Image (tube, rainbow, N blue to C red):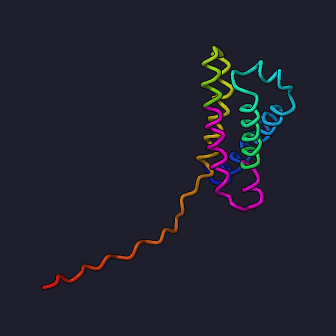
Amino acid sequence: MRTTTRNVTLWTVQVLLAALFLFAGTMKFVMPDAALAAQSPFSVSFIHFIGVCEILGAAGLVLPWATRVARWLTPLAAAGLVIIMVGAVATTLAIGGGAGAAVPFVVGALSLYVARGRWRIPTAVTPLPARRAHAKAA
């Protein structure tokens, strides 16, 4: 895939995922605690924690690349969201959600695509100085 096309694709996926996670994270605070407790086997405090992680992950998907500051945070944010989605898939399967696990699986796969696509390995690596052989003491 050409670099320009890949960059546009990554940006599109990043923005869509950021909107999704911002919405999902915000809903975890807007919904009444009783409704949250009825939908999940986890405590309300843990659900709020996941909501905070989703909101921060949404910001981490877009802001570092948009501001060109600390771009290394974007693949880390995407990787963190992959972990959240692995938990979502496992939880959905554990409570008998079967086909309901498809949505978090796809969202996790898209997050993994962003994490891999934005991961940069430094190309200018400074080689270590050559070791000198020490003269043997006679």
Q: Quadrant of the C terminus?
A: bottom left
Q: Residue 43 appears at what percent x and percent y?
A: 72, 27
Q: Residue 52 appears at what percent x and percent y?
A: 76, 40
Q: Residue at x 69, y 60 (%)?
A: 70
- Furthest residue toward bottom: 138
> Where is 67 relative to 102, above or below?
below
Q: Residue 95 appears at what percent x and percent y?
A: 64, 16
Left or right? Give the position of 131 relative to 66.
Answer: left
Q: How many marks?
A: 0
Q: Residue at x 83, y 21 (%)?
A: 34
Q: Main secondary structure of the magenta part?
A: helix
Left or right? Give the position of 22 relative to 71.
Answer: right
- Furthest residue toward top: 96
Q: Is residue 98 magenta?
A: no
Front-most of residues 133 and 121: 133
Q: Is residue 84 magenta?
A: yes
Q: Residue at x 87, y 32 (%)?
A: 30
Quadrant of the rendered image containing residue 86: top right
Left or right? Give the position of 60 relative to 117.
Answer: right
Q: Residue at x 58, y 56 (%)?
A: 120
Front-most of residues 127 and 97: 97
Q: Residue 8 appears at what percent x and percent y?
A: 71, 49
Stretch in magenta: 61-86
Front-most of residues 59 and 37: 37
Quadrant of the rendered image containing residue 50: top right
Quadrant of the rendered image containing residue 82: top right
> Where is 72 relative to 99, above or below?
below
> Where is 41 relative to 18, above or below?
above
